[in-house]
Amino acid sequence: MEHVSADDARAELHRLRSSIDNLDAALVHLLAERFKCTETVGRLKARAGMPPADPAREAVQIARLRSMAESSGLDPHFAEKILNVIIAEVIRNHEQFAEESDD
Ligand SMILES: O=C(O)C(=O)C[C@]1(C(=O)O)C=C[C@@H](O)C=C1
């Protein structure tokens, strides 16, 4: 393997970490927008008496995400795990809205 000086490595690490920080910021902003949108969905479902979870919709989302992950070089199992974590949180929020609208 080609040797790299400590100074060069530090400079490269700094550059890469700066990109990681930008990407983490983008992820947080994207998640914030997604949760704003799902809050509206949850309140709509609660008002209409619809169930918080929609497993058929989730199956479509997971298949789509796995396929996108595969074609972009991301582990599809990891992509599915992340989506499941997000959706579980959304469903918890939806259940909360449903309880509130029962009061
Ligand atoms: O699309 C819906 O019906 C939603 O409530 C949103 C959402 C999601 O976060 O994407 C969450 C829960 C459902 O099980 C399916 C999808």
Image (spheres, grey):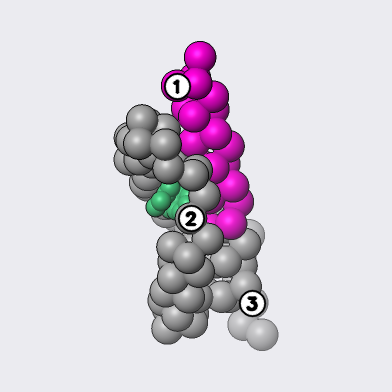
Proximity of marks 2 and 1: CB atoms separated by less than 8 Å = no
Q: Amino acid at mark 3?
A: His
Q: Is residue 32 above or below residue 13?
A: above
Q: State the extent of the magenta-drawn residues as a range.
A: 83-103
Can I make out residue 31 in this image?
Answer: no
The residue depicted at 48 percent of the width and 55 percent of the height is 54
| Location of mark 2 (residue) | 54
Q: Which residue is at the front of the view, 22 or 64? A: 64
From mark 2 to mark 1, how far is it between C-alphas?
19 Å
Q: Is residue 63 above or below residue 20?
A: below
Q: Amino acid at mark 1?
A: Ser
Q: Which residue is at the front of the view, 78 or 88? A: 88
Check if residue 87 falls in the magenta segment: yes
Question: Which of labels 3 and 1 is toward the front?
Answer: 1
Check if residue 6 falls in the magenta segment: no
| Location of mark 1 (residue) | 101
